[in-house]
Image (tube, coloured by chain):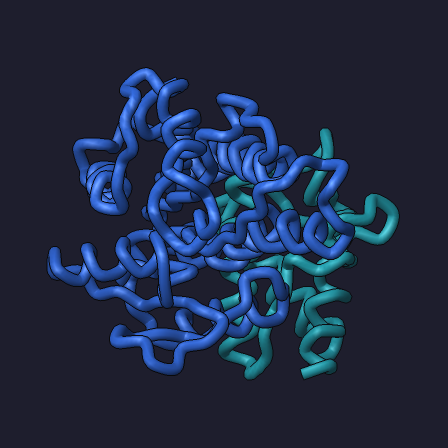
Amino acid sequence: MIIVTGASRGLGQAIAERLIEKGEDVIGLARSVSGMSIDAIECDVSDYTSVKNAAREVKRMKKPVKAFINAAGVASMNMAVTTDEATVQKLIQTNLVGTIYCCQLFASIMLRQKRGIFINFSTIAVALALKGESVYAASKAGVESFSRTFAREMADFNVRVNCIAPGPIRTDLLRGITDIQIEKITSQQVIPKQFQKSDVCDLVELLLDEKAASLSGQVLNIGGV
Amino acid sequence: MNIEKAKEIVISAINDALEGKAEITEEMQLIGGESLLDSMKLVEVCLALEDLADEHGFEFDWTSEATMSKSRSMFRSVAALAEEFASQSEAK
């Protein structure tokens, strides 16, 4: 079984659908599960109790968990000086704290199995220090740092932890961002083009493959930096 | 669950993790320089206690604040862990 957070839309949904298409048993976690076409558990990743309850529900299923994909996230493109307090809190709480809660509370399932894979999500904005994304990038830099250290803590138990850092991918998170702004970002990548959800899904598949058994504690920047 | 039963369970879990290679006392530290358990063994003990708690009808939470504090940590000794285990069983 593979668990995907943020599975009701955007990247999370695309990843969940791709994995189902590949024959995986997927459980989505989302704040609202109404209307979702896949098996899902209601869970707000920014709320410790909510994540704990979801982990409890998954444990009760008594099925091996192959991987946990932390795709839930929120974005806000603003300069730090124009970002209000609530937005700062929301970005850190959902992107960073939410990822930590999910890793912490689902880790015991994988520790017990002595195998498993965590895939967390950062952004290319961290490596490129993109202007206008300071708080968002800070929340994701935290995810990268957490993932690298968490990977070492989990390695003894044959659990791998990696991070995917996409560039601008067309999802709801990019609402209001113009094509010119996107091009300005992608021009800074090693491969200066805009990648798609399907490219992220390809990388997820790659990290889930046994052929990626030597990779842990890594941040994979889509498009390259 | 009374404290004596909790001690018995905790000692048995630690004994299994250490494969019977050491004598376990109530004062034995579970974290820090003098601990015989490395981080991997400590996690194994916690997972075993999770299972044993389940058998006794309660949930053993080893990510609580009591895990973190140096002076109050449930891992400061075998007796402290047994106390926490008994206390969580009563709170179910």
Position of residue A44 relative to residue A165, above or below, is below
**Residue A121 showing in the rendered view:** yes
Position of residue B65 relative to residue A202, above or below, is below
Chain letter, colour cyan: B
Along the line of sight, the residue nearer the viewer: B52 or A107: A107
Q: Identify the hue of chain A.
A: blue
**Residue A166 showing in the rendered view:** no
Instruction: Tell whether A173 sits left or right of B60.
Output: left
Residue that appears at 41% across and 52% down:
A71
Where residue B92 appears, x then y in whole percent? 67, 83
Of all residues, the one furthest to the right in this rendering is: B71
Quadrant of the image occupied by residue A101: bottom right
Position of residue A125 relative to residue A78, above or below, is above
Along the line of sight, the residue nearer the viewer: B6 or A177: A177
Residue that appears at 69% across and 44% down:
B30
Where residue A67 appears, x then y in whole percent? 32, 52
